[in-house]
Image (spheres, helix red, strand yellow):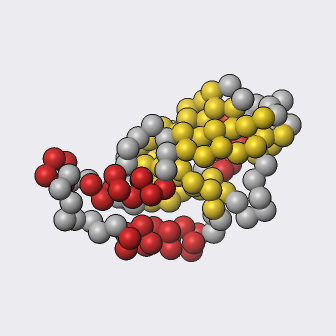
Amino acid sequence: MSEELSVSTDERLSVIDVTSRVQEAVPPEATGTCTLFVPHTTAGVTINEGEQRLLGDFETALSELVPDDGWDHDRIDDNADAHVRSMLVGPSVTVPVEDGQLELGTWQSILFIECDGPRTRTLRVQTA
């Protein structure tokens, strides 16, 4: 089973908890795995705690780890920082599924990371 979710952002760098939307996309009878894939080079997905202050801390960490400017690629389209940040996050995660439920740990959430917003992006949800 495959589904595409649309994720919209208002800021250049945003971390958004999409756990409930992904759960809704998992078929009720599914048992196996759910793979989430972001088909964009300046966005990613990860799993961590979805607490609001921590999401802000994650945005701050990415900003401090990767400076906004000074990159060679900026001569093309001025978004090299977004590419580098998304490489650190990665484009996919896989979560076990049992009887239609994501088997995340107690504090785990699925986090979509936009590094070149504001934009509307696609998150692919593949359950097998």
Q: In which quarter of the image is the C terminus?
A: top right
Q: Which residue is drawn at 49% across and 45% down?
A: 91
Q: Residue at x 27, y 54 (%)?
A: 80
Q: Which residue is drawn at 26% across and 53% down?
A: 79
Q: Residue at x 34, y 67 (%)?
A: 66
Relative side of 68 to 121, left or right? left
Percent x, y of residue 124:
55, 35
Relative side of 56 to 42, left or right? right
* Residue 9 in sight in this render: no
* Residue 23 in sight in this render: yes
Q: Quadrant of the N terminus?
A: top right
Percent x, y of residue 64:
37, 74
Nearest to the observer: residue 29 or residue 90:
90
Q: Residue 105, relative to residue 1: is it above or below?
A: below
Percent x, y of residue 10:
40, 55
Relative side of 42 to 23, left or right? left
Figure disc tally: 0
Q: Residue 53, relative to residue 86: is it above or below?
A: below
Percent x, y of residue 95:
70, 45
Relative side of 42 to 44, left or right? left
Q: Which residue lies furthest to the top in this view?
A: 1
Q: Which residue lies furthest to the right in this view?
A: 99
